[in-house]
Amino acid sequence: MTRTLKLDGIAFGGDYNPEQWPREVWEEDVRLMRRAGVNFITVSVFSWPLLEPEEGRFDFGWLDDVIELLHSNGIAVDLATATATPPAWLIRKFPEILPVTADGTHLEFGSRQAYCFSSPIFREYALRLTRAMAERYGQHPAVRLWHVSNEYGDHVSRCWCAASAEHFRGWLRAKYTSIGALNEAWGTSCWGQHYLDFEAIEPPRDSTGPINSTQRLDFERFSSDAMLELFTAEVAVLREVTPELPVTTNFMSILHDLDYFAFADAEDIVTDDAYPDPADPRAHIDASLNYALMRGAKDGAPWLLLEQSASAVSWRDVNVPKAPGVMRLDSYQALAHGADGVMYFQWRAAKFGPEKFHAAILGHRGEASRTFQECSALGAELKGLGALKGSRVVADVAMLLDWDSKWALAAPDSLPSNRLSWIGQARDWHRATFNLGVTVDLVRAGADWARYKVLMVPNLYLATPALAARLEAFAEAGGTVVVGAFSGVVDQNDHVYDGGAPGPLRPLLGVEVDEVWPLPDGDTGHIMMDGARHGFHTVSEWLDAADAQTVASYCGGELDGRPAVTVRRQGDGAAWYVSGCLADDGLRTLVRRILDESGVPVRTGAGPEIEVVVRRGVESSFTFVLNRSAVAVPVSLPDGADVLVGDSRQVSARGVLVVRHEHEAIVRVAADSAQLQAV
Ligand SMILES: [Zn+2]
């Protein structure tokens, strides 16, 4: 059954915590919500102790009133199941619910998310509350979306308690069936780790030295699965009681710990909480990659930005506010990347607690606050953008994300370098593409890649033969595959492939890696490509390119003259291998060449401060131009274009242009790159 969010126009609103305010403030809240153009509000995220003040006694009166008040003001509700934080009475009755860290420390009550996701007790109580919420509010006309828990894994995504250990053993039994199979998969003949039975296995707690890397990898997989199990248990209750209502849980951009593809399969709508750091000049580029995941998680379907900050956050060491215009730009960036809504944490700035200095739509100054003025202006603008809904981002380039490989590459103290990470590589490659004005989707191993011209694989340390075969088929069919260093090294058990890297990717890439050659911290090396020298960092490889053409070679150092970047033409396509971590200039040059050869148009006038993204609807397309620079950027619009936001001749400094046009028409941006500051 397809369950969609039934809401008029673009979703606009945020988290609302009326339980932190006296009732007379609620009336003012809804009055100001209407003024700000709010149409969607999240409630009851942390309300468990108020909804169930003592075991088995529910008190819904106050929430009834809140929902009724919102409804009578025409505001729809994203209703949380309120299971994000257990109440103190539950913890005191069952202290074993509290999570335990790898070194055996019991984490106390006093913050949020103080529960073990494997705890059967927690699950029982959480599901009882979920059922009570569903039965109470499932038929209420204001309720349009279930918001399960909150930011899974934000504080606790791994737990080493006794309940987790038991859960882990059960997961291992189901996976391996026999202890012999586990011993073989885990390579327990190394360091005398042999197990006689599953009962002897514990989660990888702090030990005397490096942990068995396959045990660790399985614990990563298990922990994500265990959290998913808790999520799907809540979803099952909601589906049973309210089969028509869509379900979500809010993601936290690209989170290392949880396989969001698996979570997305269990929900109806992908939602994201995004907090780009205003102090980081590259934050918007990384946000673009995060949003690529949000649409990639459901094969391009629109998603919701469920949380962002109206200005500063409260949880960094230094919390820099968003300068005037930046919140608006950030909001349009999410819309450009396929969001059908812009929401905030939170509606009204708190008076107390750890988030009292977290910005909100309604700041401490109330209506006079800058955030309220800026958010209200945006709310009014978004009223005219309902036509965007349902349209999908157009991209020729995709990037592969595989959690198994990502986790395996993160094993400390057992790799050639602890410095190589999927996210580091992905951000570098994505930034090079972004700076050429090209939009990138993030896709999973099992996705349909046929609509893309280029598939980037920044790292695939763990590569299965099945995935290697899919990559080969993509190239055979005319696609371009680009694979980064240290890929195809191990199988699904984290065992090195016979013959070494790139293992099953060898036929695709036509290269063999003899030895990985990481660089000491801070060192850079060089490659020579088309007569120009470019830097690389972190890692290089001693490579033999027996069945591939060398495009760039190492220059200087021990690998002088050896292949660094290769390409193997295959069928109608090509497979590139980039054996070192190229620095920005070389990466940009290489990516430009690959895109040119693959027929992907590079956008003139693009750069780190200008982003152009196209969403395609049924009848027309929408081009977004986001200008983060301090100068206005001239644009030229196609005939018949309809300007929805902005000016038809230029995009002002820190400004936005949204244009509706015929599908194949192009909005041209004429930025003078000399004026724009590189980041
Ligand atoms: Zn636990």
Image (tube, rainbow, N blue to C red):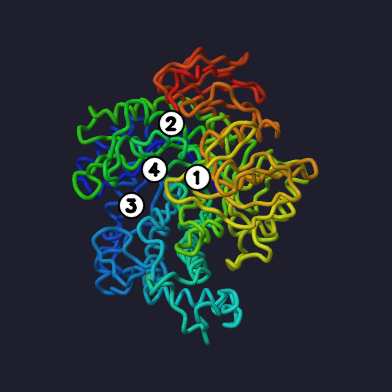
Q: Residue 505: give x, y in percent of width and height.
A: 69, 55
Please give the label number shown on residue 44: 3
In primary-sequence order, the first of circles 3 and 1 is: 3
Q: CA distance from mark 2 to mark 4?
A: 26 Å
Q: Along the horizontal axis of the image, is 639 left or right of 26? A: right
Q: Residue 163: give x, y in percent of width and height.
A: 40, 75
Please give the label number shown on residue 307: 4
Please give the label number shown on residue 537: 1
In primary-sequence order, the first of circles 1 and 2 is: 1
- Note whether residue 245 is visible: no
Q: Along the horizontal axis of the image, is 360 left or right of 393? A: left
Tell me if residue 487 comes above or below residue 42 in the rendering.
below
**Mark 1–mark 2 CB contact (< 8 Å):** no
Amino acid marked by disc 4: Glu
Please give the label number shown on residue 679: 2
Q: Is mark 2 within 8 Å of ligand 1?
A: no
